[in-house]
Image (cartoon, rainbow, N blue to C red):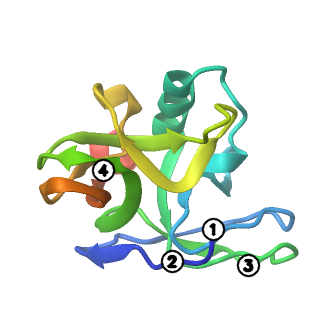
Amino acid sequence: MANTMRWRYGDTCPVMLPVLSATVIEIGDLIYLDTDNAKPASAQADQGTEAANQELFHDRFAGVAMQQSRSGDTQPIRVATAGVFEFDCVSGTFEVGKLVGADENTGGTALEDQFVTPVNTPNLAIGRCAKRVSPAGTRGLVDIVTPGEKGG
C-alpha cells in the first residue's frame, strides 16, 4: 500500500524505533515490535487463525508509522503511540467506543498493514472507534492504544 498519512488529530506521543535494512515500512502502517525492531503488521508470522494473529499483534503493537523505511534504509523511524487515525475497514456501521483490531488478508495468512476490523474483546484490539460511522462506511477513525498507553 502506498504511503498514507492516516493521523487526523490528537497527541501522537511519538517514539523512534529501529528498523532492519530489509524491512519495508510505509507511512500509515500498523507497527509491532519484534524484539527491538519495528515491523509492519504483515511481517508477523501467521498464528493459524485471525484471532490468534490479532492477539499476538495486540500484545506487540507499537503504533502507527509516521515515516517510511525503504529496503536498505537503516535509520530509525517515528512511530505514533497515541492519537486518532483514519483507517480503511470492512463496510459497516460503527459506534463510538467499538473495539478495533488489525484485519487479516483474504487468504487468511497474514495481517493487513493498513486495514482494521471490529473485534469483540480487548485482547484483540489496537484501539477504539473515535467517531460514529452511520450510514455504513469503509473508513473509520480509530483512537489507537499501545501497550504503554494501557499501563503495561
Mark 1 and mark 2 in contact? Answer it, CB < 8 Å. yes
Q: Name the residue under label 4.
A: 149
Amino acid under label 4?
A: Glu
Q: Name the residue under label 2.
A: 4
Work out whether 152 lies above or below 33: above
Three-letter code for the amino acid on which mark 2 is drawn? Thr
Could you tell me the amino acid type at mark 1? Met
Gap in angstroms between the C-alphas marked 2 and 4: 24 Å
- Residues tagged 1 and 4 counted as in contact (Cβ below 8 A): no
Q: How far apart are marks 1 and 4 (CA)?
A: 27 Å
Element at label 4: helix
Q: Looking at the image, is mark 3 or mark 2 nearer the viewer? A: 2
**Residue 36 appears at what percent x and percent y?**
67, 51
Q: Where is residue 43 in the image (x, y as percent from the top left)?
A: 71, 47
Mark 4 Cα shell of 10 Å, populated few (<14), some (14-19), many (≥20): few
Mark earlier in primary sequence (2, 4): 2
State whether residue 116 is above or below residue 130: above
From this view, report whether residue 139 is shown above or below residue 107.
below
- Mark before the other along the chain sequence, 3 or 4: 3
Q: How crowded is mark 1: few (under 14 residues within 10 Å), some or many (20 or more)?
A: few
Q: Name the residue under label 1.
A: 1
- Measure the C-alpha gap from mark 3 to mark 2: 20 Å
The quarter of the image holding the C terminus is: top left
- Which residue is found at the position 88% from the left and 75% from the top? 72
**Residue 31 appearing in the image:** no
What residue is disc 3 on? 75
Q: What residue is at 30 percent from the left and 30 percent from the top? A: 122
- Mark 1 vs mark 3: give the one in front: 1
